[in-house]
Amino acid sequence: MDKIIGFLALQQFIYGIGWLVGIRLIPEIRRVGIWLSGFAILSGLYFSISPTHGETVTSWHIYSAQFVILLVMVMVRRANEALFFEPYRWKEDASLIVLFLMIVLWTFSVPMQTSVVVMTASFIVLWMGIRTVVLSYRSISNEFGLTITLLVNMPIIFFLLVKGVQAFAIIDHQMIILDPNTGRLESKWYLALLLALTGLMHVNYVVMLLKRLIQDLNKMTKTDVLTNVMNRRAAEEALCRELSETTRNGDAFTIFMIDIDFFKSVNDRYGHAKGDEVLRGVCKCMRETVRKNDYVARFGGEEFLIILPHTLVESAVELADRIRQKVADLRFESDDIRITISIGITQSDTNDTVMEHIVSRADKALYRSKECGRNQINVNTKILNACSL
C-alpha cells in the first residue's frame, strides 16, 4: 500500500516537472500548462501527506490533506478555463475554500469529530468537480470530440464517485475506499486505478494542446498575417479542390480577381501604415459581403482572389458590384482617401485542367477593367462573351 502511494505521488511530481519543462520549451502552452503543473504537484503532495493504513492519524494529516485536495480541484478548473479562454471563477472557489477553513477553525474551538472536516471537503470537491465537468463538457466535445472528452473527464468523475461515497459513508467500513472519519486511503485497487487514470488524463491534455498547436500552425501557414484572410498558398489549394469538384460532378464555380486602384499612391502619400489600414478595410468589406462558404484570399500585394463555389457567373456579377460599391464608400481617418477596386470575373469550365487556366482568364478580365478606366467589372469566360459593367 505504501509503495503504491509513494509511486503515485512520485508520478504526479514527475508530471508537474514535465509540464514546467514543456512551458519553457513551448511558451504557447503556458496559459494551460502552469495550471496542469500545479494540479500534478499538488496531487503528489496530497498523496504524500494523506493518512495511510497503519499510520497514526493526526488532525494535521486530515486537515492538510483535505485542504490540498481542494486546491487540486481549483487547478483542474483553472486548466479547463485557460484551455478554452473562459473567465476564471475566482470568487466561487475562494468562497468554498473560506467555508472549509471556517469549519476547520470551528473544530478547534468546539468538540467535534474530524469527520466533519472530511465530509465538508468531500462535498466541496463534489460541487467543484461536477461544475468543472459540466462546464467543460461542451467546449471539449465541440473541439476535440466525445472520446477525448470522456478520457479527460474520466479521472475526475472517478474521483468524484469516491468522494461521494466518502461524503455519504454509504458502504461498510471494511469496503470503504477512504475512511470517512480520517480520509485514510484504504484500497489498493482504488490507488492503482487512479494511477492509470491520472496518467491518461495528462496524456490527453498533451494531445489536446498539440492538436491545437498544429491547427494554429496550419492556420498561420495559410493565413495572411496583415489582413487575416487566406494567403496565396491556401487560395491555390482551394482552387485545386474546386477544379477537382468541377471535373468530378460538373458543378461550376466563379472567381473574382480584384486589384486596388492606384494603391501605390496611397503608400507614397500617406505611408505604409495607412496603406495597411486600407488593405484591412478592403478585406473586411469583402468578408462581410460574400457568403460563409466563399473564399477570400490575398493573392499579391494589393491583389485579391475570391472563390465562389457552386456559383454561375451571371449571379456572381451582382455580388461583385456590391463589393465594388462597398469599397468605394469606405472612409478612413484621412477624409481625402478614396479607394476603388477593379474586378475581373471568370467561371470555371470542364476543360480547365489546371488552376493557371482559370486564373489567367480572371487576370485578363481584370486587366481589361483597368484599361477601361478602373473601378469597373469585366467578365471573361469561355461560356460568355467579355463584357464590362
Image: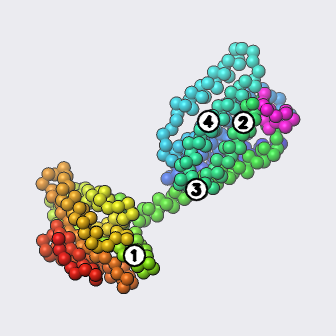
- The residue that disc 3 covers is 145
In the image, which disc is placed on residue 163?
Answer: 2
Q: Residue at x 34, y 65 (%)?
A: 296
In magenta, the rendered stretch is 169-181
User: In percent of the image, x 28 and y 76: which residue is there?
Assistant: 346
Colour scheme of the rendered structure: rainbow
Instruction: Let me know if residue 30 is in the magenta part.
Output: no
Quote the CA–CA distance across marks 3 and 2: 27 Å
Amino acid bearing label 4? Met
The answer to whether marks 3 and 2 mark residues whose Cβ atoms lie closer than 8 Å is no
| Residue at which label 1 appears | 251
- Mark 2 → mark 4, Cα distance in angstroms: 12 Å
Please tell me whether mark 1 or mark 2 is closer to you in this view. Answer: 1
Circle 2 — which element?
Answer: helix
Q: Residues within 10 Å of mark 1 (few under 14, many from 20)?
A: some
Disc on the earlier residue, 1 or 2: 2
Tell me the distance, in whole angstroms, between the alpha carbons under discs 4 and 1: 53 Å
Q: Nearer the viewer, residue 187 or 175?
A: 175
Name which residue type carries label 1: Asp
